[in-house]
Amino acid sequence: MTVSTRRSDDGQVLVIQVQGRFDFSTHQAFRDAYEHSDAPVKEYVVDLTHTTYLDSSALGMLLLLRDHAGGDVASVVIENCNADVRRILSISNFEQLFSIR
């Protein structure tokens, strides 16, 4: 499990990439990724390109990120999900809360 971050060239977008299993063992690293950002962020992108597994604690972490970003007015995008991860997000009705691409 690895969590890494990068900013867009203009600094407005924070991309959080999760590699491997996205579960409770990722909790602190995921939270640190968005809570300790130096400058304001307009959009958060959670890149799951290399995520192999997602469980209910990961869903909770995504909700905490959404709350941190501003709740209903937040701009949080989840992208590059494999079929299994996408299915979990769909079953959980996360399309209602996040932009999933």
Image (spheres, rainbow, N blue to C red):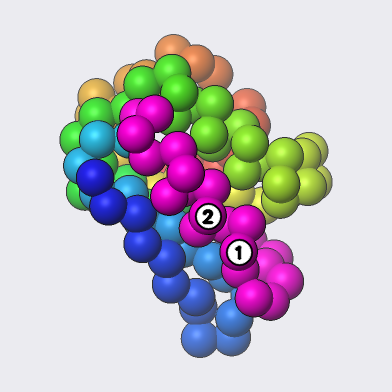
The secondary structure type at the circle numbered 2 is: helix
Vertical comparison of 93 with 77: above or below: above
Task: Give the residue displayed 36% in from the left and 21% down from the top.
Answer: 55
Q: Residue 15, position in %: x, y?
A: 46, 63
Q: Quadrant of residue 23?
A: top left
The answer to whether residue 30 is magenta is yes
> Which residue reaches farthest bottom?
9
Q: Residue 95, position in %: x, y?
A: 55, 29
Q: Are marks 2 and 1 in contact (CB under 8 Å)?
A: yes
Vertical comparison of 33 with 70: above or below: below
Q: Residue 96, position in %: x, y?
A: 63, 27
Provide the residue span drawn in magenta: 23-44
Task: Give the residue displayed 33% in from the left and 49% down from the top.
Answer: 18
Q: Nearer the viewer, residue 4 or 7?
A: 4
The amino acid on which the numbered mark 2 sits, given as a three-letter code, is Asp
The amino acid on which the numbered mark 1 sits, given as a three-letter code, is His
Task: Give the residue displayed 71% in from the left and 46% down from the top.
Answer: 68
Left or right side of 76 for 54: left
Residue that badge 1 annotates: 36
Task: Give the residue displayed 37% in from the left and 40% down from the top.
Answer: 26
User: From this viewpoint, is residue 46 visible?
Assistant: yes
User: From this viewpoint, is residue 95 visible?
Assistant: no
The N terminus - image quarter = top left
The secondary structure type at the circle numbered 1 is: loop
Other residues around mark 1 within 10 Å, as few (<14) / some (14–19) / many (≥20): few
Left or right side of 12 for 101: left
> Which residue reaches farthest top?
91
Q: Nearer the viewer, residue 101 or 44?
A: 44
The answer to whether residue 31 is magenta is yes
Residue that badge 2 annotates: 32
Q: Quadrant of residue 10?
A: bottom right
Vertical comparison of 30 with 89: above or below: below
